[in-house]
Image (cartoon, helix red, strand yellow):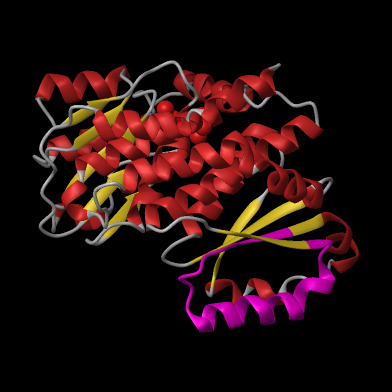
Amino acid sequence: MAVEEMEQLVLGLGDQLRWAADVEAPAPIEVPGGLLIVGMGGSGISGDLVSVLASVPVTVHKGYGLPAWVSNRPPAMIALSYSGNTEETLSAVEEARDLGLTPGVVTAGGALGEVAVGNGWPHIIVPGGLQPRAALGYMMGSLLRLVEDSVDLKPGDFSAAADLVDQLTGGLGRDLAADLAAGLRDRIPVIYGTNGLTSPVAQRWKTQINENAKWPAWWNTMPELDHNEIVSWTSLSTLTRRHVGIIALRDDSESSRVEARYNLTARLTGSDVAWVGEVWAQGVSRLERILSLCAMGDLVSLELARAGSIDPMAVPEIETLKQLLAEEPL
Ligand code: PA5
C-alpha cells in the first residue's frame, strides 16, 4: 500500500511542474554576479539540478552558516526547505540576514516561511503535506520561477517537461525501470552522471534509492571518476562482482570524449562488477532531459522498494535524528 502512495506522488511530478509554471511568483531575482542556493537533502537537490540549467555561476551550499566568501562578495541568495524547519538552512538564512542580504525563499511553510513573509523577502509557498523528496516539481519549478532570467529556459519548456515525465511515470518508463531494478536486485547501485548535466541527477537517484528503498547507493561524476574510482574495483572484486551494479546516466549532448570515456571505463572495469546498465535522457530541452532521468530514478527506487516490501514513505532515522539533535545543546 505504501508503495502505491509514493507512486501516486511520483505520478504527480508533471502536475507539480505545471503548478509551478502557473503560480503567481515575485519578480525574478536579479543575479548580477553569482547565485548562492542553500538547502539540504530532498530540498537542496533542486539547487543542484537548477545549477546545470543556469546561465550564471551557481554555488549550492549544504551545511550550517554560509561559505566564507559570501561576506566579501555577497551573492544573490535563495533558501530551499520544504518543511521550513531545517536547522542548517535556517542558520544560513540567519547569517544572511545578519549580512543584510535579502534571500529568496521556496518552502511549504515552517520557520523559514514565517521569516520570508515577515521580512517581505521574495518567496513562493508551495503546497504542504508531502515528503520533501516527493515535492521535487514544486521545489525545483518554484526555484526556476524565482531565477527565470538567469536560466536556460524557453517558453514551453516547463509544459514539455511536464508532459514527458507524465508519459514516463504513467507507463512508458515502467518496463525500463523494472529492467534496471532487476539489474540492481541484491546489489549496491553506483550511479554515474556527467559533469555539467547529469551529475546532480545521479545524486538524486542515489538519494531516492536510499530513502524510498532504504537501500545503500553511491554516485559519482564522469570524467572525474576516471581519475580515481576507475582503479577501485579490483581489490574487493570477489565482493563487487557479486554485489555492485553500475548505472550510467547518458545524454546525447555528451562530448565525444565523454562518450569514449564511458565506453572505455565499462571495458576496463565491467568485469569487476556484477552488472552495468545505462539510461539515456529523453526530450529536447535540458530541463526535459534532466527531468526525464529524474523520473526514471524515482521509478527505479520504487521498483526496489516494491521488491523488498519496503515502505518508501517512512524515513524514521531522518526524523529521529532531527528530534535527538533538537535535544542536544546548541
Ligand atoms: O528527504 C528528506 O526527507 C530529507 O532529505 C529532507 O529533505 C532534509 O532533511 C531537509 O529537510 P527539508 O527538505 O524540509 O529542508
The segment highlighted magenta reads 246-275
Q: Residue 203: x percent and y percent?
A: 53, 51
Q: Residue 6: x percent and y percent?
A: 60, 25
In the rendered image, residue 260 lying in the magenta stretch gets the answer yes
Give the quarter of the figure containing the C terminus.
Answer: top left
Would residue 209 be found to the left or right of residue 187 on screen? left
Q: What residue do we see at 39% from left, 17% from top? A: 128
Q: What residue do we see at 56% from left, 28% from top? A: 318
Nearer-the-camera pick, 249 or 22 = 22
Q: In which quarter of the view is residue 93 placed?
A: top left
In the rendered image, residue 156 lying in the magenta stretch gets the answer no
Would residue 36 be found to the left or right of residue 281 on screen? left
Position above or below: 178 against 226:
above
Q: Residue 220: x percent and y percent?
A: 58, 62
Q: What residue do we see at 32% from left, 24% from top? A: 126
Position above or below: 278 against 300:
below
Report the label total. 0
Nearer-the-camera pick, 172 or 182 = 172
Q: In which quarter of the view is residue 190 placed?
A: bottom right
Would residue 37 be found to the left or right of residue 297 on screen? left
Residue 188 seen anywhere in this rendered image of the structure: yes
Q: Residue 208: x percent and y percent?
A: 59, 40
Nearer-the-camera pick, 190 or 5 = 5
Give the quarter of the figure containing the N terminus.
Answer: top right
Residue 235 seen anywhere in this rendered image of the structure: no
Nearer-the-camera pick, 188 or 279 = 279
Position above or below: 15 against 27:
above
Q: What residue do we see at 13% from left, 58% from top? A: 72
